[in-house]
Amino acid sequence: MDGDDAQLADWRARALALEAEVGKAVIGQARVLRRVLTAVFARGHVLLQGDVGVGKTTLLRAFAQVLGGAYARTEGTIDLMPADLVYYTYISEAGRPAVEPGPLIRHGEDLAIFFFNEINRARPQVHALLLRVMAERSAQAFNREVRFPHLLVFADRNRVEREETFEISAAARDRFMMEIAIDAPADEAMRRALMFDPRYHDTDALVGSLQAAMVPHTELNGLAACIQRHVRASDALQQYALRLWQATARPQDVGVRLPDLEVAELMLAGASPRGMSLLLRAARVAAWLEGRDHVTPEDVQAVFPETIAHRLVFQPVYEMRRHEIAPALMDAILAHVPAP
């Protein structure tokens, strides 16, 4: 084994141990666990969406616990403003106005996880600030630029709530490497455990019981770069990915048909160049987690729905049906674009 091979083998074992540790707090979500793990080691931001109370916050808190580094969070509320992330003001014990750093900049360069709970309750102005933080890993505060070289943004949003919420713009969605749907477990034994096992009734104790800081977070950027260099994508695989990209913009050209829809009139825009780049980054990590040094079509297919669906822009008449159209379209594209 050369140096990279040995390092990647060691880190793969750590990654799988980390996944197993999070699995102690979140049951019945094996696919979701693997997708979040993939995004973490591809250094991509993660958005979870689902119904109320299915464990989105628990899952993201569990990952924050085991990943290590400084952690901060904020709650999305209708009155939250961008400045609330950067600083807060109060009256000191001396009776004078005082200013302290807000959750986003309090830890400076050591910030590793920023968790935005219920992001769709925050105003678009807040989303705009988050866009810069996610894209550039920096923010302006107190007349200086604060950089976050190790930062990942985790966010969640409820699928069913509409009152006092703001739709996340296409530009904001595109900054997330993955949007992952999470549903309640279908298995009866798992449902019984969630109902009757006291371990799952105290989220703070459950997350706190997990091993903290299982990996040195300052090494993850270098590891991610090593994975991308080491895991190859053949010419045939690249051509397959390019055909998938074209199909996201013009699904009718590959023969996609969906019930009760005119597919030729469905799309306003397909996946972005950023999205397709992130798709291949995620596919390389998926291959690495399976112990391979090359990407297979199955690796691309595994991460395609979560990496691409949220980037698609439908014609306005279809946007309100996104939650039902997007999964069907992803399945149809994968079924109609031949794999090498």
Image (spheres, rainbow, N blue to C red):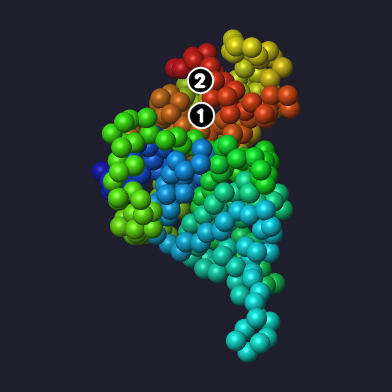
Report the label total. 2
Quadrant, the C terminus:
top left
**Residue 178, x across and y down, in percent:** 52, 39
Residue 301 falls left or right of residue 268? left
Kindly indicate the quadrant of the structure image that contains residue 327: top right
Residue nearer the viewer, 124 or 275:
124
User: Which amino acid does the dot numbered 2 rest on?
Assistant: Asp
Residue 239 in view, yes or no: no
Q: Residues within 10 Å of mark 1 (few under 14, many from 20)?
A: many
- Above or below: residue 206 compared with residue 85: above
Label 2–label 1 contact, CB within 8 A: yes
Tell me the residue at 45%/26% (across/down): 301
Residue type at mark 1 is Pro
Q: Nearer the viewer, residue 60 or 206?
A: 206
Residue that badge 2 annotates: 331
Asked which secondary structure carries label 1, the reply is helix
Q: Residue 305, which numbered label? A: 1
- Answer left or right for 58 relative to 329: left
Q: Position of residue 169 (x, y in %)?
A: 68, 41
Give the SS element for disc 2: helix
In the current view of this chain or complex, which residue is farthest to the right? 316
Disc with the residue nearer the chain's start (2 vs 1): 1
